[in-house]
Image (tube, rainbow, N blue to C red):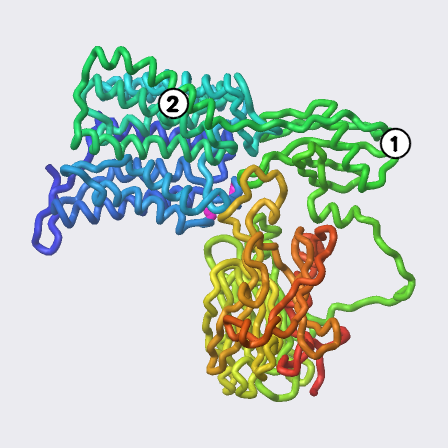
Amino acid sequence: MTAVAIRGTTYPVLLPKLRDPRLHLAATIISLQVIGQVGFHFDLSIAQILISLATCAVLEVAIAFRTQHVLMWPASALLTGNGVAFVLRVPGTVHGDWWSTRGWPIYAGTAAFSLLSKHIIKWKGEHIFNPSNIGLVLCFLLLGRTRANPLDFWWGPMSIWLALALGIILLGGFAILSRLKLLRVALCFWASFAIGIGVLAAAGHAMVARWHLGPITGFHFWLVLVTSPEVLVFLFFMITDPKTAPRSPVHRVIYAIALGLLASLMIAPTTSEFAAKVALLGSLAIVCLAIPILRRFPIAFDRRLALVATPLLIAAFAGMAAFSNSRASAASRPLPPGTLPPITIQPSHGVQTQLDRHTAELIAHDLLASVHATTADRLLVHLAPGKGQEPPYAVAQLAGRTYQLHQQANGQWALAGAAQQAAAPQLVSNALHGTTLENLAPSLGLDFQQGSFRSGVTSESKAMMGGGLCWLDYNGDGWQDLFVVNSYAGGDPVATSQLFENVDGSFRNVTAQTGAGLAVQGDGCVAADLNGDGHTDLVVTTTSGVDILWNRGNGTFRQAQLPAHGWYTGAAVADVNGDGRPDLFVAGYSDPNEPIANSLAGFPTNVAGVRDLLFLNQGGERFREVGVAAGLESAGFSHGLGTAFVDVNGDGRPDLYVANDEDPNQLYVNVPWPGGAAADPAGLGFRFEQRAACSSPTRATSRPRRSGRTPGAASRAPARASPRRSEPASPGGAPPGPT
């Protein structure tokens, strides 16, 4: 036995033998990783794989060294880390970006919990759960489909790569499980799972996926699941863990059959591929938890009772599956009348559904309802996989321009935001004919670069919004300085907000010496003297809350946070209760972790909104949130973007206007509390009453990802909302001069 001496102490070195099944399993998974990258373009980087492997390996070596006083090759830990990396995907990761560390805390955290679970969650000295399985299940349940996704059921059409992958899975599975005498587990699971999924398919179950246009039903649904490479990996290499599977042959058969039927039953109420995959993985966690319970409280086996109970259980399973089964229907439309340009249907790579002529012509009709074309133009159209877990969308090329169209619940194809705005009718005016604009920013020292887009346009919803800016005289020299909110894409905050001091009309970056650099995914800002000390403070809204930069008056800022947890965008300041102190309103936007069930809409309508907040200034840098009590939304939250205080009725009270994204805009009028102080339980002295809402939801045209402008401009730069508001935004295009 090899040994190593460390500081005078000898430690045995434990290495696996070549016949160790763990090495054979590792070779199988690594082969699938390579094929996935080369043949199927997995959205997974080498860095993400290494992070998972290293996390598990380091923990396993450290634990073995401390508890057993040995240096052990972490064969099992590497399998756990490889299993996590093989299944887990972080939205926004792009194939080919080999060293992307996007979402590295998710990979490291999932791998760490998976590895530690077998050392912490134990019963009678043995771990209860399959390590990678329980880690993945908790990851998907806690983070949701917007932050973490499992590997797709469907890898691609039949090809040499798919045949090679299936061959490796089957040959490796049969070879390894035959040696471990666990092959019956895999086969019995597959048989019971195939029967259970068959019952669902016969009952009309439907599933939507990002790689298929419309619901997946019937035999197609059954075939996709029972032949899915991911399901085969699950049954050959995850449920057959010798440490968690039962010991006796009979119990192993019962275990496999129960697992297959439970997985089918848990898939029954789901409608999306994400939910179905989590249900499949979750069924193993449930069965693993049940095993020690049944060992602790064994059930006597009666053959006669089993003969009677078996058909009853089968009938009950079929009934429960059919009762909880989800159904979806695809909207079908006849072809509208009208002349179309020549249409060429291109291959839809990464999508199982290939466009037919009828669907392509429907897409063309819906596109031409907003975009002008002639019979001389040629339309090229294909499908592309949906983003995250969204269904596929159509990509149309017409007259040198590319458009994206998403299918709606009624079957119509709607233009995505940027193309829709470009296609909308434009009002033309000659008032500025001959006027040109010149970009003076570089020559004046304003070299700011938005961090979210440093590597191109990002698909990360929390980063694609861009950021706002505020004019303020932070040092009291009479010149308007510029504060710019920054953001970043990915898990690593590499960009911070920036403060530029105005020095006689030119600017210098004073972020570092003032402490104004916030490493946040920022959106909006507003400047005001919030604590009445004569120095302008800053409020910054972010994707995770609301930050305040308190101006110390010595040229530096102190960072603090308000009690707000969620994604906030617009911000505005006014004295809403007349106590002489400026109060703060922040618009809530979207919660990507709370998707709207069965929604086919695009972002942000397909996720829940976030409640708007109103903070009353209590003095002494203290605030009290009173939004609901003051009459703002308490349920059915809108997706707020821009906001402004304005006295709409001339009564001297600041009223509130909120511009929403895809939801009707809102106008709240500030009125005295009805009934006076006796009827005012919170002692506010005022109340906001919604008097108007836009009759049709309009999308804010100032979203950076669509037009390059600052979102919610009224709420991102300070406006004259009350006497307590500080420096108004400078009119005109030149830098503000001395006040």
* Part of the protein shown in magenta: 96-100
Q: Nearer the viewer, residue 530 or 161?
A: 530
Asked which secondary structure carries label 2, the reply is helix
Give the amino acid at mark 2: Ile
Q: Are marks 2 and 1 in contact (CB under 8 Å)?
A: no
> Does 726 sit above or below residue 309?
below
Tag shown at residue 708: none
> Percent position (x, y) of residue 360?
73, 28
Q: Quadrant of residue 252?
A: top left
Considering the numbered disc 1 on the image, is that residue within a helix, a strand or a loop? loop
Residue 375 bears which disc, if any?
Answer: 1
Chief SS of the magenta region: loop
Residue at the location (50% across, 45% down)?
146
- Percent from the top left, x then y, of residue 607? 56, 47
Quadrant for the N terminus in the image: top left
In the image, residue 544 above or below residue 93: below
Is residue 166 one of those drawn in magenta? no
Badge 2 or badge 1: first in the primary sequence = 2
Picture residue at 47% right of the left edge, 48% below the top? 100
As measured in the structure, the alpha-carbon distance from the residue carrying label 2 to the one carrying label 1 is 51 Å
Q: Residue at x 36, y 23 (%)?
A: 260
Q: Could you tell me which quadrant the C terminus lies in?
A: bottom right
Residue 169, label in figure: 2
> What is the x, y in percent for residue 328?
58, 28
